[in-house]
Image (tube, helix red, strand yellow):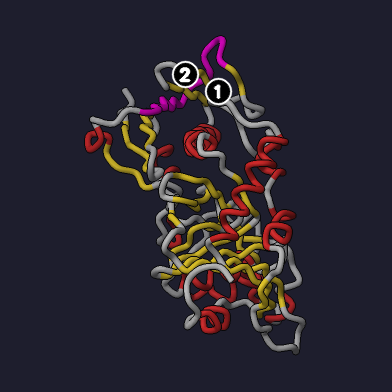
Amino acid sequence: MSREHQVVADLGPVRVTVVTDHVGVVDYLRAFYSLEPSTAHEELSGWTIQARLAEPEPGMALTPWRVGYRVDLESQQAVVCSSDPSDLAITVRKVIREVLLDYCEAREYTMLHASAVADGARVVIVVGDKGSGKTTLALGAALGGSRFLSNDHLILYRTREGLVVTSLPTPIPVKIGTYFDYADRLGAPWGNEGVDIEEFRRMPCQQRYGHDVRLLYTYRGLGQRNPLHTVLAGRQVVVVLAGYAPEGQPVSAPTVVADPVGALWPHVRFDWVFDPGLNTHHLPRIERDRDAYARDAAERLAELAAVSRVVTWRHHGALTPLLAAIADQPEGPR
């Protein structure tokens, strides 16, 4: 008879109990969430997920990978079944993620293409398109001692304490050039998407940056607790619209943006929120339509602009020059 494993995934303000007959599920989840014995949280109520390494039961809904699931909204119980250990673990991770999203949805969240790090009472949010250096900047700061709040799924929601930022505990894709910049401190990747690291090791340094291949890490694998829910009130917050400086040119001075909401708007994530292939729906939850989400997104951006300094900045892959430039500046927006 298989041993039953029971743990609690800590999502900050919410927790999810996972009960499974397959220890591989627990090992997999530990790469993404802080897990504690469920006996330490006997007083807690909330979602419980039963994860079973077995064929789906008759009548279960099926994912495209034929993972079966059944949900009881009233009792907040979910059962997930698959004969494939990997598919079972991945689906459970996504169901846990949905509990976090449900919490944020109730607080009218919006999501940005942005990384974020925190250093003492300072939060730096790096916004930009693909290839703008969001991961490189945040990863370098995190390896230097900052808290890694978000890689590319920055969530903003409001509470009585004010605007809060957090993120989805998803894998962190690190491009091969950035990997070699920090290889001595990164350790082994969580996944490598079939990349032959030794092939790239033999390449000249500058040649590696031209390849859009990635290694995958997790926040926990980098020694970072995630998700963190960080209240922005009372902190020095800098929002950086980032991009690489042309080769041979110096890092630019940060320049204050005249219309911060307008500048940030193109980076609001409608793609992830409304793509069912990304934002999976195993748990029934009420969500806003695109118009309501857009209205709330505009409000969250205005709230962010009100508590931060929004600047443009061209860099060479490290946050240090920006942090030095703002170190002596007072808190609050400019």
Marks 1,2: beta carbons within 8 A: yes
Provide the residue designation for mark 1.
Answer: 284
Task: Determine the main secondary structure of the stretch shown in magenta.
Answer: loop
Disc 1/disc 2 C-alpha distance (Å): 7 Å
For badge 1, the amino acid type reads: Pro
Q: Quadrant of the N terminus?
A: top left
Element marked by disc 1: loop
Helix, strand or loop at mark 2:
loop
Bounds of the magenta span?
46-60
At 49% from the left and 66% from the top, the residue drawn is 123
Quadrant (top left, top right, bottom left, bottom right) of the C terminus:
bottom right
| Number of numbered labels in the structure image | 2
Residue underneath mark 2: 73
In the image, residue 256 lies at what x, y percent?
Answer: 66, 74
Could you say where residue 184 lies in the image, as x and y percent from the top left?
49, 75
The amino acid sitting under disc 2 is: Leu
**Would residue 229 appear left or right of 150 to someone viewing this image?**
left
Nearest the viewer among 119 and 201 is: 119
